[in-house]
Amino acid sequence: MNLQNHSLLITSALSTIARFAGVGLNFAVAITLTRNLPMHEAGMVFMLMTLVTGISLFSRLGVEQWLVRDVARIPETEQRQQGQYLQAAYRLVLLSSVVFMLGWLVFAPLTQHLLFDDAIQLLPLLAAGSGILFFNLVMLNSAFLKAIRHTSQSLLVQNALPAVTYMLLIVVFWMIFTQNQHYLWLYIASLLLAGLWSFHWLRPWWQDLSPAVSTPFKVRDVLQQSLPLAPVSFFSFLMLWADTLLTGLLLSNEDVALFTVAARLSFVSLFFLGALDATIYPRLLKIHKQQPEQTRRFFWQATGLVAGVLGIVTLLLLMTSDFILAVFSLEYVQAGMALAILLVAQFVRAMSLTFSFMFIIQEQVRYLNILLMSALVVNIIANLLMIPHYGIEGAAGATLLANLVLTGGVIVFFFKNRLLNDQGRLS
């Protein structure tokens, strides 16, 4: 177990470095926007990013979760079989992306009015629907790399690649990027470039993605496997971003900019959590299947690792919050209280990570879905009640309340269902 612990720490450290590189690049983009655009225009870009990310997630129908779960169980030497899973995932996501892109076009005028206060131009808003497909390519390719345990590459593709392409385009078109909402067009183009670029890391599997190579999976088969996994991703996204969406609905574009900056800074802890997720989950799957007697010990070690890393990150961010907010622009310091509340909320949420993995591994996802739905309902109701009275601090408080409900429920059901009782008796 000492060698295993050493390997886990090293892999987690490399994953964290890769994740942090992505975080840094995303913040470089955000700081560039907040320092060069009026607050209401920065708010529009952030809201568009949230919409594209969210609609893309829903359009994937849980396929990336299915891809990680099943490919992680395939021996590394079975490259052809891995490629067949990836090809099947592409087929379903291509079809679903087209459907959601059409829906984006239909609802764009309503979105323009409700979420952007009619300040965004309709043409770039319509064109942004194409980003659903290209962002999905990035996420599928990242999920596949995660499944085959290319963790650092997976994290760089998922987190750094869209930011790199957007920053490159901003630099190239620097003289005009702030004019006439060109920053929106550059964001759309960056998604296209990121989607195409993400195939670079999958070159060894290209031959298995050829149309001449058939996959044993039908679209219906993949859909039946992925849909039960989808609600976890759906609810997780809404738990993170429902506050932003409701802030856009109930408050101004300026408030969206303030809350989004605070939320993104609070997500730094979740980026570290994502690095641990990419390291721990595939290993936990493998140990549970191949060395079940080691599951209990590895589970508690991973839980301790999550608590330690996230606790340190949260404290550091709390102590430096005003300074960090000022980097975006001095006017963003007024989001300090919202940031403090969100940081505590994300730490509470992080403590549910390893417990949630066991529900998935033990095929008891329905409990997670129920808890996520309950927490989401609490979040939405709390937002509707608190935002009109307390503004962005009310939105942050709603997140904290919902995360307390979620993590508390996950831990209670974990012990009630005794998910570890049959594991590790010999360890």
Image (spheres, rainbow, N blue to C red):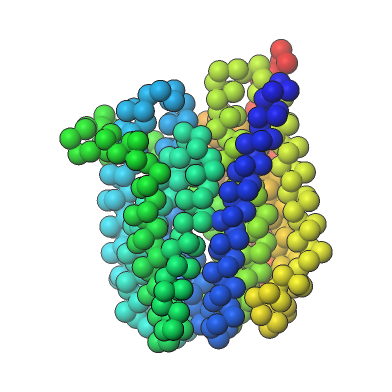
Determine whether, in the image, residue 178 is placed left or right of residue 137.
Answer: right
Number of marks drawn? 0
Q: Residue furthest left?
A: 212
Towards the viewer: 377 or 257: 257
Q: Residue at x 64, y 59 (%)?
A: 267
Towards the viewer: 270 or 244: 270
Q: Residue at x 66, y 35 (%)?
A: 10
Q: Residue furthest front?
A: 172
Task: Place residue 103 in its image quadrant.
Answer: bottom left
Q: Position of residue 91 (x, y in %)?
A: 28, 44
Does residue 319 lie above or below 172 as drawn? above
Q: Residue at x 49, y 45 (%)?
A: 154
The quadrant of the image that shows the N terminus is top right
Q: Position of residue 227 (x, y in %)?
A: 41, 42
Task: Place residue 112 in its image quadrant.
Answer: bottom left
Q: Residue at x 47, y 50 (%)?
A: 157
The quadrant of the image that shows the C terminus is top right
Towards the viewer: 330 or 335: 330
Residue 404 in view, yes or no:
no
Q: Position of residue 133 (x, y in %)?
A: 34, 57
Q: Residue furthest top?
A: 426
Residue 427 in view, yes or no:
yes
Does residue 364 lie above or below 132 as drawn? above
Q: Position of residue 325 (x, y in %)?
A: 70, 73
